[in-house]
Amino acid sequence: AQSVTQLDSQVPVFEEAPVELRCNYSSSVSVYLFWYVQYPNQGLQLLLKYLSGSTLVKGINGFEAEFNKSQTSFHLRKPSVHISDTAEYFCAVRLLQGAQKLVFGQGTRLTINP
Amino acid sequence: EAQVTQNPRYLITVTGKKLTVTCSQNMNHEYMSWYRQDPGLGLRQIYYSMNVEVTDKGDVPEGYKVSRKEKRNFPLILESPSPNQTSLYFCASSLSRANTGELFFGEGSRLTVL
């Protein structure tokens, strides 16, 4: 079965600083990879996804992520964060074959300090 | 507007009092799912449905029931709620099994069982 580990439960950064949120996954077969964002008191919304092709994927709000198959990682990055990026971020995987279930990581709470 | 609507958004109840959390989507999606979100555990799938009258257990189905009599609705039923079911619940939907996995989430239902 696949699993996802987000290595940091909380990440505090200063406004306009770069940020990286780390995600590692475990699966014996190929997967699709996703990052979702949850703003306070809201549901989750898709930030970006990797399906195939270029390992660097760009998402909304200036975020990007890089798929590294050898390290089974899918880290999320932004070169300069804004106060409005304060949210919880979830990494998720889904098998290419079989059930459509998304398996989520534990979440990383990103706090932006002025 | 395309959306997933959950009700109620907030509910406090007592042990043993049956309750239903409704979920409705207006996107003609085949796949629907319920997740619960708990601190440090991320989102865990409770039940899912591939289409009308087709439902199956997720990772944490104990204490829950679901039904899918119509394509747009997927209610979550707690027959006899217990305090360990205090959680934030999300309903989600996506187009079909062949879909690459983007889920559309409702805004969540925060349930407290006393």
Image: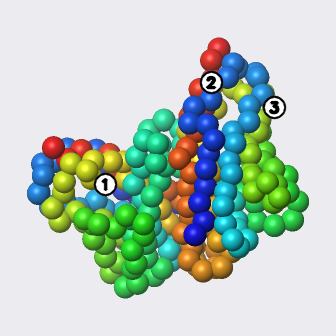
> Do the residues marked 3 and 1 share a common chain?
no
Q: In which quadrant is the C terminus of chain A drawn?
A: top right
Q: Which residue is mark 1?
A: B7
Disc 3: host chain: A
Residue linked to disc 3: A79
The quadrant where residue A94 appears:
bottom right
Q: How far across and how far down the image is residue B84, in percent?
A: 25, 50
- Across and down, in percent, residue A106 comes to 53, 47
Which numbered disc flags the more N-terminal residue, 3 or 2? 2
Where is residue A98 drawn, in percent x and y? 60, 80
Q: Amino acid at mark 1?
A: Asn
Q: Residues within 10 Å of mark 1 (few under 14, many from 20)?
A: some
Q: Pick the residue in front: A23 or B23.
A: A23
Judge depth for marks 2 and 1 and give the one in front. 2
Q: Chain of mark 2?
A: A
Is residue A16 rendered to the left or right of residue A3? right
Taking the image as drawn, is residue B71 in sight?
no
Q: CA distance from mark 3 to mark 2?
A: 15 Å
Judge if badges 3 and 2 mark residues of a common chain: yes
* Left-right relation of A52 to B88: right
| Residue type of the residue flagged with mark 2 | Pro
Residue hosting label 2: A12
Q: Position of residue A70 (x, y in %)?
A: 83, 58
